Image (cartoon, rainbow, N blue to C red):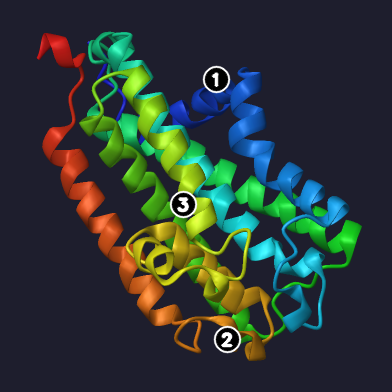
Amino acid sequence: MSALPSTPLVAARRVPFELLSFAREVSSLFFNFAYPTLMYLIFVGSGVFSDGLERTDFGMNQFFLPGMVATGVILATTQELGMRVVEERETSLLKRLRTTPTTALAYVLGKLGQVGILALAQTTLLMTVATLGFGATLPDSPRKWGIFISTLLLGIACGAALGFGLSVLLPTVRSANGVIVPTVLVLQFFSGVFFPFDSLPGWMQTVASVFPLRWLASGMRAALFPDYMAQMEPSGSFDVAVGLVVLSAWTVVSIVIAVRFFRWVPHEQS
């Protein structure tokens, strides 16, 4: 009798399967993958949401880039996983998957591989369009590259963990759609994605500072903006270290919730 494949092998085999399943859905390609680049093209091409740019010596091509990178990471991880895992659980796909050699860890690793690749590819596409098509600049020092890479990777980990955490708490696809999509959309307006963060009302800044998107966006601004732009942050600093701590805290809490409440079967069957 042959031995069952190992968890790492099953996880590795699931990654291309997950990517192919994602690519077959046009709506996912548009709203989760292409959205940041398309929105960047609209903003830069139309000149909308340009309030506050008179305080900078660069244009919208650079101004919107950090926020769109941050938004793309959240869409590719939190929104994609939060909705997809709920759908697969409530349609009993996970229940059927449990009868195969796929362990819970292999399933999670397969999903993490999928969203990690998507987030990196999405960021690469956006940065390529922004730099080659519109003259935006990349991080200009090793320190800024370090901020960019560490914030991006931790943001992907945090977004993925949060997506799994939300998926175990939301009982149906309808509830996932009703909670995740509008929340992500609202947080974009609260987190300095479309407007200078210091121009937002104080209560918006306070609310946004609780959530990962605000810190993911400010970390990207630290990497992609000139240092003097820190004066437009509420504290006069990009607070990169604080942002990394907040992202790490959300990652840990989300993992604890996901592990504690993960289930293979629909809520009504448990």
| Dot 1 or dot 2, earlier in sequence | 1
Q: Mark yes or no: residue 110 visible.
A: no
Q: What is the number of callouts on the image?
A: 3
Q: Secondary structure at mark 3?
A: helix
Q: Give residue 223's position: percent from left, percent from top.
A: 61, 76
Label 1: few (<14), some (14–19) or many (≥20) C-alpha neighbours in 10 Å: few
Question: Which amino acid type corresponds to the residue marked 1 in the rendered image?
Answer: Ser
Mark 2 sits on what residue?
230
Q: Give residue 61's position: percent from left, percent from top.
A: 81, 64
Contact between marks 2 and 3 (CB within 8 A): the answer is no
Label 3: few (<14), some (14–19) or many (≥20) C-alpha neighbours in 10 Å: some
| Dot 1 or dot 3, earlier in sequence | 1
Q: Which residue is pictured at 21% across the width and 40% down the height?
A: 258
Q: Secondary structure at mark 2?
A: helix
Q: Quadrant of the N terminus?
A: top left
Question: Which amino acid type corresponds to the residue marked 3 in the rendered image?
Answer: Leu
Q: What is the distance, in whole Å, between disc 2 and disc 3 at their CAs?
A: 21 Å
Note whether 120 is above or below 24 in the view shown. below
Contact between marks 1 and 3 (CB within 8 A): the answer is no
Mark 3 sits on what residue?
187
Question: Which amino acid type corresponds to the residue marked 2 in the rendered image?
Answer: Ala
Viewer-closest of 85 and 268: 268
Contact between marks 1 and 2 (CB within 8 A): the answer is no
Note whether 30 is above or below 64 in the view shown. above
Q: Which residue is pictured at 23% across the width and 15% down the height?
A: 98
Mark 1 sits on what residue?
21
Quadrant of res 149: bottom right
Q: What is the distance, in whole Å, between disc 1 and disc 2 at their CAs?
A: 41 Å
Instruction: Report the side of 118 relative to 30 (left or right).
Output: left
Quadrant of res 132: bottom right
| Dot 2 or dot 3, earlier in sequence | 3
Q: Give residue 114's position: percent from left, percent from top.
A: 50, 36
